Image: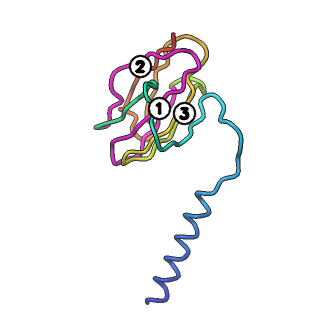
Amino acid sequence: MRTIQAKAAVLLMAALLVGGCGSGGGSPGPGTATTTGAVTEGAPAITIKDFEYGAPLTVAPGAVVMVTNLDSAGHTVTADHGEAFDVDVRGGGGTATFTAPSAPGTYPYHCTYHPNMRGTLSVK
């Protein structure tokens, strides 16, 4: 039984290491998520807490938006229409960023995992 547990542990660690190593250099495009360890001071931000996005956010066209997830569950910030932005943020303090659309307008968004979560991003 110990041998099976040891093999399972080794396989799990290998899978985690391989899964965390991606190729893909260069800069992310608009609407692409990137994970980061630090929040840029003064950057526009969405803070997810208690399965809510908080107040609507207004940003400049093309602004980098920080998303912080204080819930234990993972969430997304996904534009309702088109592919303006779609960010997956792990729970427990996970962070990610995305680039706001360059076209001014109001962009409603939701969480693909929890459809009752809704928010609004205004670009002006």
Q: Which residue is mark 2?
A: 57
Q: Residue furthest left?
A: 50
Q: Which mark is residue 93?
A: none
Q: Is residue 54 magenta?
A: yes
Q: Residue at x 55, y 31 (%)?
A: 98
Mark 2, other Cα within 10 Å: few <14 / some 14–19 / many ≥20: some
**Amino acid type indicated by mark 2:** Leu
Precedes in sequence: disc 2 or disc 3: 2
Pair 1/2: label in front: 1
Q: Nearer the viewer, residue 81 or 77?
A: 77
Residue 2 falls left or right of residue 105: left
Query: For the residue labelled by badge 2, is the local secondary structure a helix, a strand or a loop?
Result: strand
Precedes in sequence: disc 1 or disc 2: 1
Q: Which mark is residue 40?
A: 1
- Which range of residues does the magenta coloring cover? 51-79
Pair 2/3: label in front: 2
Q: Which residue is mark 3?
A: 86
Query: For the residue labelled by badge 3, is the local secondary structure a helix, a strand or a loop?
Result: strand
Disc 1 from disc 3: Cα separation: 20 Å
Disc 1 from disc 2: Cα separation: 16 Å
Q: Is residue 61 magenta?
A: yes
Disc 2 from disc 3: Cα separation: 16 Å
Q: Are circles 2 and 3 on residues that touch, CB within 8 Å? A: no
Q: Residue at x 52, y 36 (%)?
A: 87
Query: For the residue labelled by badge 1, is the local secondary structure a helix, a strand or a loop?
Result: loop
Q: Residue at x 43, y 45 (%)?
A: 94
x, y percentage for residue 104?
Answer: 56, 10
**Amino acid type indicated by mark 1:** Thr
Q: Residue at x 33, y 26 (%)?
A: 54
